[in-house]
Image: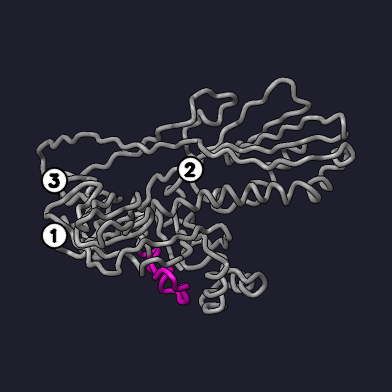
């Protein structure tokens, strides 16, 4: 009963983790499954549409994302024999809720760190969005990236963003129930086509030192792929950090119809970048640069031209919380039943078959002090499935 109650408290305290895809391979959910700690998740292929009567065979290109179970977190505590005899409600209120809430916060914190995989961003780092336009433009970007416009889109945003937008929009163009929520709870509820969830675990990003004394440019025409050769940075300096966003003067295309969206393609930097002694730097980026109109995985209208400016988002050295607006299919979370061992006083593991969350509680006995050292463990991993189905909102 204590282990089941711990899982219930955990699930109720999760925000981000409850809103993303759990459709990972069911081998992870099997009791005592021995599949290792990684899993390749197959992404659906894309195709182009042919016209006319002639057969136009296309190769099937499959892509994969690796989900790694690499996060084992736990809360360790000790209970006396008297405390363990309490009824489950009293035990939960006095001991479990605060401990398991800390575990839930860590799971959400790790999940929201996936912002570093997301290339699209709306807003200005260092400025809290104060109008509905920023949020509507974020939805626009999701639509341009062919995200399903259904009722499952979620925003996880900071308390400061919540206070700012509720004050600016309270009572405007809302159903009466949502207006009541604004006044009674100080929350947005459902608005602008998505659900708003305030989350203190939104990650903060610090941008690189990329502008002082430099005017970086693309070095070489017709570049494609997952990196771009650039020049004119300050020499021998870490100019960009993983998670920084840049533009290269080319527009994005819709991933389904591959037409120009009219918006600059944003690229996220996938690793820290240090310039060499001549101020040159090769920047690893996502998505890849693919201007091929016949390719179903086309991402841009054209390759960046030689000498075009490399433009980072925002000012250098800016500290900015990065809220996430996302469709559930943008990210996935895997959890696994952890093993139990012989020689324990008591050990249980439970999982939620509907949502796939799993937890283990192990208790031993200390005869000298008549107490029970206890640990509550979770083992999980996150992966970004479709970074284009999420948008960052810096503040």
Q: Name which of mark 1 and mark 2 comes first in the sequence.
A: 1
Q: Quadrant of residue 313?
A: bottom left
Check whether the beta carbons of the residues at disc 1 and disc 2 lie within 8 A of each other: no
How far separated are the C-alphas under marks 3 and 1? Answer: 32 Å
Q: Quadrant of residue 77?
A: top right
Left or right, 178 with respect to 99, comes to: left
Between 369 and 225, the residue placed more toward the observer is 369
Residue bearing mark 3: 51
Left or right, 229 with respect to 77, comes to: left
Q: Name which of mark 3 and mark 1 comes first in the sequence.
A: 3
Between 20 and 66, the residue placed more toward the observer is 66
Residue bearing mark 2: 382
**With respect to residue 2, does 271 lie above or below?**
below
Note whether residue 302 is visible.
no
The kind of secondary structure element at disc 3 is: loop
**With respect to residue 23, does 169 lie above or below?**
below
User: Looking at the figure, which quarter contains the N terminus?
Assistant: top right
How far separated are the C-alphas under marks 1 and 2? Answer: 36 Å
Q: Position of residue 127 (x, y in %)?
A: 44, 73
Q: Give the label, 3 or 1, closer to the camera.
A: 1
The kind of secondary structure element at disc 1 is: loop
The kind of secondary structure element at disc 2 is: strand
Q: What mark, if any, has residue 305 been given in the picture? A: 1
Check whether the beta carbons of the residues at disc 3 and disc 1 lie within 8 A of each other: no
Colour logic:
one colour
**With respect to residue 149, does 32 lie above or below?**
above
Query: Would residue 128 be counted in the magenta stretch?
Result: yes
**Label 1 environment density (alpha carbons within 10 Å; few <14, some 14–19, many ≥20):** some
Note whether residue 122 is visible.
yes
Query: Would residue 25 be counted in the magenta stretch?
Result: no
Which range is magenta? 122-140
**Label 2 environment density (alpha carbons within 10 Å; few <14, some 14–19, many ≥20):** many
């Amino acid at each position: 009963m204590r282990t089941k109650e711990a899982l219930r408290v955990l699930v109720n305290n999760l925000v981000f983790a409850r809103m993303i895809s759990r459709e990972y391979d069911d081998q992870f959910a099997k009791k005592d499954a021995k599949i290792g700690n990684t899993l390749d998740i197959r992404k659906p292929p894309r195709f182009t549409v042919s016209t006319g009567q002639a057969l136009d065979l296309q190769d099937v290109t499959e892509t994969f994302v690796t989900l790694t179970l690499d996060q084992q977190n736990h809360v360790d505590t000790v209970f006396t024999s008297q405390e363990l005899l309490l009824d489950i409600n009293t035990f939960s209120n006095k001991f479990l809720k605060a401990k398991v809430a800390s575990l839930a916060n860590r799971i959400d914190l790790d999940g929201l760190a996936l912002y570093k995989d997301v290339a699209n961003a709306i807003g200005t780092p260092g400025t809290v969005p104060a109008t509905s336009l920023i949020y509507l433009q974020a939805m626009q970007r999701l639509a341009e990236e062919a995200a399903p416009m259904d009722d499952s889109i979620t925003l996880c945003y900071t308390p400061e963003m919540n206070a700012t937008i509720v004050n600016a929009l309270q009572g405007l163009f809302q159903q009466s129930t949502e207006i009541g929520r604004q006044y009674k709870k100080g929350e947005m509820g459902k608005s602008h086509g998505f659900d708003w969830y305030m989350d203190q675990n939104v990650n903060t990003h610090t941008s690189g030192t990329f502008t002082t004394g430099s005017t970086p440019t693309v070095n070489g025409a017709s570049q494609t792929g997952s990196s771009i050769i650039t020049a004119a940075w300050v020499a021998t300096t870490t100019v960009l950090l993983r998670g920084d966003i840049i533009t290269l003067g080319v527009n994005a295309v819709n991933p389904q119809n591959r037409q120009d969206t009219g918006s600059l393609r944003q690229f996220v930097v996938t690793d820290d970048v240090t310039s060499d002694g001549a101020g040159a730097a090769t920047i690893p980026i996502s998505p890849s640069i693919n201007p091929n109109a016949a390719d179903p995985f086309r991402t841009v209208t054209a390759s960046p031209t030689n000498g075009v400016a490399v433009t980072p988002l925002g000012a250098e050295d800016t500290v900015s919380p990065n809220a996430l607006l996302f469709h559930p299919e943008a990210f996935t979370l895997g959890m696994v039943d952890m093993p139990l061992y012989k020689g324990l006083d008591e050990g249980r593991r439970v999982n939620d078959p509907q949502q796939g969350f799993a937890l283990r509680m192990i208790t031993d006995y200390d005869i000298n002090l008549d107490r029970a050292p206890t640990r509550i463990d979770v083992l999980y991993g996150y992966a970004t499935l479709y970074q284009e189905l999420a948008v960052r909102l810096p503040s």
